[in-house]
Amino acid sequence: MAGERLVDEAFDDGFTQYVKESRPALRRAAFVLVGDWFEADDLVQRTLIAVYRRWAGLDRRDGLYGYTRTVMVRQFISERRGHRWSRELIQDPLPEPDPAPEDAARVGDRLLLLAALAGLAPRQRSLVFLRYWEDLSIEETARTLGCSQATVRSSTSRTLRILRDRLGELYADRGRELR
């Protein structure tokens, strides 16, 4: 029994250290995917639970963050398709503090971009996240999403076209509101 306890503590310590090191980056990445800090925290938690379940069999020398990111992206896509569980929907947005005056323009642009990203399908949003936020190659993105490189290229092109159109509409709407 005592020997088993030492193994479990060592196992937990390695995982605990990994969580301490990777959680901030995972949380930022999750926010890009879901667009909400509370949902990002939930996604990171579910991702880390899934990684913990496989912790004993994982190669922890290289690519552990990449593996965790892949788990997170696939979990995000799966949940948005409704395979796992239904999501609670908040009807009114939560109040946010007012931004500092000098940051107001950047915040406005960021909100428009997040609104455009929120309108994308989960797989499209994952493509933008992997290619432009995580700066993965086409090959790495294809491997993460489990599709061909040609699919990544064509889907990325189509998704960027959709984003350009939506951002144009959002900026036009913003201009009308300012008048």
Image (cartoon, helix red, strand yellow):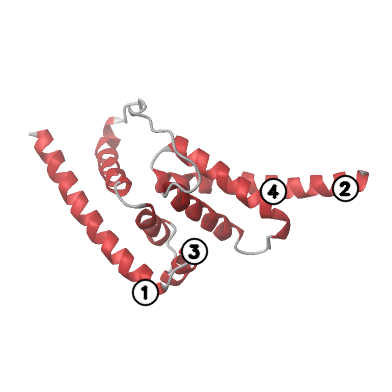
Around disc 2, counting alpha carbons within 10 Å, would you say few (fewer than 14), some (14 to 19), or many (20 or more)?
A: few
Residue kind at label 1, given as amino acid type? Ala
In space, the residues marked 1 and 4 are separated at their CA atoms by 36 Å
Q: Report the side of 25 relative to 49 (left or right).
A: left
Q: Give the residue pinned by disc 2.
A: 4
Residue kind at label 4, given as amino acid type? Phe
Asked if the residue under mark 3 is in contact with the one under mark 2, i.e. CB atoms within 8 Å, the reply is no
Residue 15's tag is: 4
Using the image, determine if residue 37 lies above or below residue 157: above
For marks 1 and 4, the one nearer the N-term is: 4
Q: Nearer the viewer, mark 4 or mark 3?
A: 3
For marks 2 and 1, the one nearer the N-term is: 2
Residue at 21% in and 56% down: 164
Residue 144's tag is: 3
Return the x and y of residue 54 as percentages of the image width and height. 67, 55
Around disc 4, counting alpha carbons within 10 Å, would you say few (fewer than 14), some (14 to 19), or many (20 or more)?
A: some
For label 3, the SS is helix
Residue kind at label 2, given as amino acid type? Glu
In space, the residues marked 3 and 1 are separated at their CA atoms by 14 Å
Question: How many numbered callouts?
Answer: 4
For label 1, the SS is helix
For marks 4 and 3, the one nearer the N-term is: 4
